[in-house]
Image (cartoon, rainbow, N blue to C red):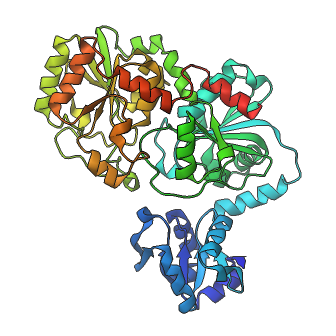
Amino acid sequence: MLKRLDNEAALILEKKKVYGYDWSKDYLSELEEAFPGVAGNLTVIVDGSKRNRGMLSREGNEVYVNETSWLKEAGRQEAVVLILSDYHREAYGTLCGLLPQFEGDLTVYYFVSRETAIEETYREQYRNRELENIILFRSGPHASSYIKGTDFADNARALFDYMLAEHMNEAYELVWLVKNPEEFGRYRDVKNVSFLSFDWSVSENKEERDRYYRVLCLAKYLFFTDAYGFARNSRSDQVRVQLWHGCGFKTRVNFARCEKRYEYTTVISDLYAEIHQDIYGLREDQMLVTGYAKEDWLFHPDREAWERLGLAGAERYIFWLPTFRTAKEGLAQLNEYDLTGQTGLPVVDSYEKLSDLDRLLESLHTELIIKLHPFQDRSRVGRIHMNRIRVLEHETLVDMDLQINRLLGYADGLISDYSSAAVDYMLLDRPMGFTLDDVEEYGNSRGFVFENIRDWLPGKEIFSFEAFCEFVREVGEGRDSTAERRRELKERMHKYGDDRSCKRIVEALGI
């Protein structure tokens, strides 16, 4: 039996051992504020994710986050289970699968956050209203991991741009959920386009809440990359589409079955459809093999932006897009591990090597452009000042309203490691190199979707600084030693090779 935690139920839980289940820090904080007596009785927290485990110190009390096998102790110790997440119905179903006795006489309680309580009120208000011609967009991770620019980017942004170009805003209201709507005044006069703050879900201002929940409850289509929790209570006639960031080499950090969390997800091939079914717990009919929306940008690079960045002048350009390992301050939960060395970069880990590389690039009339992940700690890389090596800052791209795939079309070669950007770049059929000096460490920390990652890298393997320089020399001299390998893998990893992914997504959904 599943029962909501209220004041009456709290009196029961304050006299019992309480086992928390499927928790989040925000939920735990709200529980401590709303029901301090219940929070104080938490004996242990159970979670299926390895990353969430360990000792928690809360208000002077220590609570251990342990694996799901501890649920068996709940019955033996006459404890009660309290669900501490947005997905309480889903969590309850998992509990019943783990321990069938929960389907019987045992009561499982769930705590409702303030946001969920507000949403339930609006959902009831709009329950019998017909959906409207609204398409809702959101990009980037959960609000707690917000970095400026990530909330108006990626595949969702590419699809939005396509819809505007096709005048779909004549028939649909296109609405974005962003951090600060006032930053998007340039769209003020565009018909049927608006920007709302995702923070308005819990705003004290009723007008802001009303605007937010109107579109959330009545939108026909909801598109997002990464964060999807905001759409967890959508109606059965609303269509949620996870556009995601890319089809790459890294596996998912925390497994949670997403079969009921959205209706569809887009992928680039049948191969990746099978992979994403596995790592996201989806059905075959939820896979839209369309290509990724932002891949369309590769075929239409932005010449004006290229010149505004001052990148015109060299004979050839190589982009280096390392995967982030050490996150910025405030995002420690995203850390993989720290790279030792002066620069914080793979392979080219000292300023002496950077100077040697700069001289090589000078001799080849080639420029190396380093673009780090927006989550990456750039405290060391930011000190690089070379003639032919340039760090392209995330903030610069945000200020120019420029997406990286609008620049990669001008790159003569790409250096990456395990980033999905390399899989996108395959479409341009140009040389690629992969830094692999920490491949074993990264595999142990994060893991890969392919059993033998080296069999699936469509370019030159780079384990040393000498190999890095050799790849740079190849591109600078117009050579392409791994073309055959890249083309073979492209046939397996991509179904399409054109600029019509957005068109296919829209047609697949019948918009």
Q: Is residue 59 visible?
A: no
**Quarter residue 504 falls in:** top right
Question: In this picture, is 139 found above or below 32?
Answer: above
Front residue of this view, candidates 280 and 318: 280
Direction from residue 272 to residue 203 in the image, left or right: right
Most foreground residue, 156 or 188 = 156
Give the x, y percent position of residue 429: 42, 19
Give the left or right position of residue 73, taking residue 258 as reference. Answer: left
Measuring from the top left, give residue 242's x and y in whole percent.
61, 42
Q: Quadrant of the C terminus?
A: top right
User: Where the N terminus falls, by quadrant?
Assistant: bottom right
Residue 197 x %, y % = 62, 43
Whether residue 278 is visible, yes or no, is yes
Instruction: State whether residue 98 is above or below residue 226.
Output: below
Of the pair 56 and 479, the residue shown nearer to us: 479
Residue beneath the point at 32% across and 46% down: 325
